[in-house]
Amino acid sequence: MSVSAEARPAPAGAGDRAWLRALKGRFIVFDGADGSGKSTQFTRIMAMARGAGLAITEVRDPGGTRIGERIRDVLLDPEHEEMDMRCELMLYMASRAQLIAEHIRPALQRGELVLADRFLSSTLAYQGTAGGIPTSEIMDVARAALGHPDDPASTWPDLVVVFDVDEATAAKRLNPLLDRMERKSSEFHAKVRRGYLDQAESDPARYAVVDARPGEDEVTSSMVRVLRERFAPEA
């Protein structure tokens, strides 16, 4: 006999909400290749944090503002196949700058938890590792949009959680109505995955990798474990 969704045990850590208070005032990004399941986990952690009484600002990148959503439409429209990679870079960063000004920075100043579905890490993976733009050039533009990392007034994530999944598994999870980025070749998406893993390896203080191949509940347990270890190790 199958077990109903209501009868399933909650993922590890989902019922213990006290530790979630340690996320107050943090800026956390969920990222990963298309089909990694990050959006599902994003929804879950958001529900858990709200259940713990945290004030949350959720944003998506690109988008999240009136201007950003217009940029998003241009970026993901399959008709824009001729778009140059550096044009992509500039548009993503422009949307990001507006998102920071309108929502992210004000929310952090209010002490809210900011959860972002994608951010600069996506640009480093897609336009950088997969697209061929040198990291140094991307970071030059990033500093214009986010501020210099050493400047207290800048806006950089406290943690980027990368949901890692192999290309075959990711392909099975994608919506058949693919957007312009999702339609890229398997070789391109393999490079994207490598890009995320390289970022995490080079900056372990700011990144954490979660194996996104298992079922949703197991991935949630891994995600909770990562967040607790980073922000509430004594909880």
Image: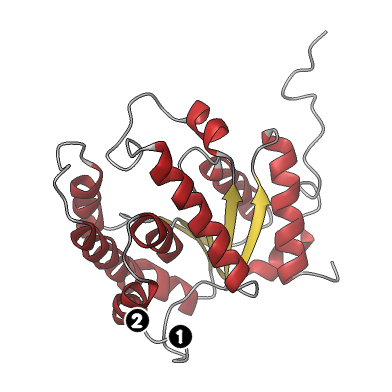
Mark 2: amino acid: Arg
Q: Are marks 1 and 2 in contact (CB under 8 Å)?
A: yes
Q: Is residue 30 visible?
A: no
Read off the residue under disc 2: 143
Residue in view at x 51 percent, y 71 percent: 157
User: Looking at this view, is 100 or 127 the one in front?
Assistant: 127
Q: How many numbered discs?
A: 2
Residue in view at x 70 percent, y 66 percent: 21
- Image position, residue 130 (x, y; %): 38, 54
**Crowdedness of circle 1 by 10 Å Cα count: few (<14), some, many (20+)?**
few
Residue in view at x 45 percent, y 85 percent: 149
Vertical placement of 202 versus 192: above or below? below
User: Looking at this view, is 176 or 132 the one in front?
Assistant: 132
User: Looking at this view, is 224 or 19 the one in front?
Assistant: 224
Read off the residue under disc 1: 149
- Image position, residue 211 (x, y; %): 68, 47
Give the colour scheme of this rendering: secondary structure
Q: Quadrant of the C terminus?
A: bottom right
* First-in-chain label (1 vs 2): 2
